[in-house]
Image (spheres, helix red, strand yellow):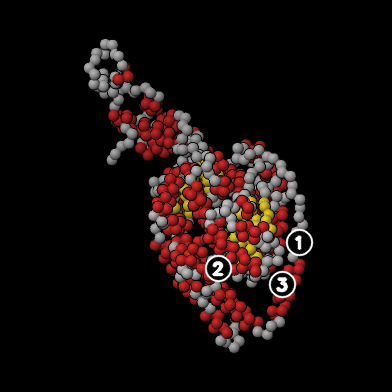
Amino acid sequence: MSAELNPRLTFDAFVVGAANRLAVTAARTVGESPGTAYNPLFIYAQSGLGKTHLLTAIGHLSRRLAPSADVEYVTLEEFVEWYQAAVAAGQSDALRNRFARVDVLLIDDVQFLTHRREMQAELLRIVEQVQAGNRQIVLTSDRPPAEIQELDERLLTRFDGGLVVDIDSPDFETRLAILRRRASDRGVAIGPGVLEVVAGFEVQNVRELLGLLNRLVAYQAVSDVALTGDVTHQLLSGEAPPPRRRAPIPEVRRPTGDEFADFLSGISHTVHEQVEVWRARVLEAIKRWGGDGYRTARLEALLQQEVPTGVERTVREYERDIDRLRGFQRAMARVDPNRVSDPIFYDPNRVEEADSVVQTALKEGRPPPGPSGAWTLDTLVAGAANKVALSAANAVIASPGTGYNPLVLVGPPGVGKTHLLHGIGNQLAGTRDARVACLSAQQFVDELLDAIDGDRVEAWRKRYRSATALLLDDIHLLAGKERSQQELFHLYNALLEDQRQLILTLVSPPHEIQGLEARLVSRLEAGLVAELSAPDRELRHGIVRRKLKAKYPDVEPELVEYVADRPADSIRTVLNAVQRVIRAAEAQGETPTAAFAKALLEGATPATSRVARRVRTSGVLISPISNVRSREKVVWEWPYPEERVIEEFA
């Protein structure tokens, strides 16, 4: 039922500093001794400061110290979806009991309780049951409990009755430690003084900080110039506000877990003194999983034997099958939430059948729109203006979802963002079992509005949550659209958690887009923000040469040089110039030359064998030498139609 704990988010991987020391201390205490202190523990912080990391680390620590502990991690959105599905299936009590019986319940992003009175009442019941059983509950939010709008006073009292701690933005030393740790983990060699410069940028959260590191790594991968402090500052200038220092938060000593370890040791010793340990183990598993609604026939068969062999192996295999069934349930929830309560998902003897049902549902679901075959990477010309972006694109194609995720392509209109987006999409779509969603932000909004109007939001969500990659073009168009950003936020989190690739494009860096929510900005800048600038001379030359060569294999080199030397603020401008030359040459039955192009593009009309044009007017018969009262109403030289063509129709 719950999301699997991210194996990378442990206490060992969390860098402790003055801004987060109190929260880390409290989290460790809870992980070492669940239910005995700080219950509930409520951690709040702005997006990207490590709330989810700490929440997950608590779960890992609890499982390591007590392998049999039942630890559940769930986002509030998942909690809502599961509850609604359970109510629809008439199994709300079973779901409530499931959450109430866990040893450590971890709930992420509870700020979304706003305006949800029914869910607040349900959460209150679960909190009360968990506390009554001396079990632990930990919650996170992007704001303190008192600032969650319309929060039930009873819930607020419960939260305040435990411990409420916050995480602040990291100071310089913490930022530097994070950068060094992440660079080391990635095996990236960074020159002396470089990370110190990066740490000097005062960012709002860790995601933005890692986004700066990603930018350095991507730059270093395609540049022959060694990274120095000066080069780094120049590269990252404008990416973050100027540095400032924070006053340190007093250190809080972390209590040891010796007493809890002794307690575990004593319990373990007592259990091993029992005469029939295996029977107790089987009965415990039957009680636990049977109480959750799972069929236990496989375990019950063990009790019919006098002295069965391989009891522990059988129980472990049974529990692994339940884990698989839960994974299938999560997949089905993305495709069809109404089917998550199917009995097949509660029978460990039908694992393969459940897998088949989910796979069929995934295939039958209407696929999301895919990338256009008109834009491929093979037709994209490389140059200094897009070198970093192309390098990042190749890295994403080689290992989708695990490297630069998300990849954010930034640049003004006409520099090739959409071409590159679809090119990557076509490469990803060519892999086995790929389900690539590629669409514009406007299409995203239009589909959402249609889904809301037709009461099909759940079906719309599952359509995109089943994607192996989401490619969204021009997301700056979502600015100011609250519901669209909310849906993208949840979709982003769901896909990122499953390590599915996200690629998005904007006209400027995320933090410069007015009306884009901070939580989205934070997540976008946690990946790699790769800029595509106006085409440089190398890129213009490659585009012009390819286009002219396709039409004229023996194209004059001087013609390529002339057109490529013309300044252009976008690839679109370059292509328009090339097309203009080709069309004019075709109209006159000539092979274009540099002189021909110069005459055409700089305004002069090349000499032709056409019959001299007569003076034509707008219909008013006048003498060329007579007085003209309104010269703007007279067409003195009628243009050839082919020079006015905007689009040709086949």
Out of 608 and 303, give the one closest to the viewer.
Answer: 303
Tell me which label, 1 or 2, sits earlier in the chain. 2
The answer to whether the residue labelled 1 contacts the one labelled 2, judged by CB atoms less than 8 Å apart, is: no
The answer to whether the residue labelled 1 contacts the one labelled 3, judged by CB atoms less than 8 Å apart, is: no
- Locate residue 329 relative to residue 101 in the image: left or right: left
Q: For label 3, count other residues whose C-alpha is less than 10 Å away and answer few (under 14), some (14-19) or many (20+).
A: some
User: Which element type, helix, strand or loop, lies under badge 3?
Assistant: helix
- Locate residue 594 relative to residue 140 in the image: left or right: left
* Spot occupied by residue 438 in the image (x, y as percentages of width and height): 44, 50
Determine the residue positioned at 41% across, 57% down: 456
In the rendered image, which residue does mark 1 sit on?
A: 255
Image quarter where the N terminus lies is bottom right
Q: Is residue 54 above or below residue 87?
A: above
Q: For label 1, count other residues whose C-alpha is less than 10 Å away and answer few (under 14), some (14-19) or many (20+).
A: few
Out of 102 and 325, give the one closest to the viewer.
Answer: 102
Out of 161 and 578, give the one closest to the viewer.
Answer: 161
Per the rendering, the mark at residue 96 is 2
In the rendered image, which residue does mark 3 sit on?
A: 264
Q: Is residue 253 above or below residue 1?
A: above
Q: Nearer the viewer, mark 1 or mark 2?
A: 2
- Locate residue 527 relative to residue 555 in the image: left or right: right
Q: Quadrant of residue 237?
A: top right
- Amino acid type, residue under disc 3 in the picture: Leu
Determine the residue positioned at 72% across, 50% down: 18
Q: Is residue 200 above or below residue 486?
A: above
- Gap between marks 1 and 3, in whole Å? 17 Å
* Spot occupied by residue 338 in the image (x, y as percentages of width and height): 44, 65
* Spot occupied by residue 472 in the image (x, y as percentages of width and height): 47, 48
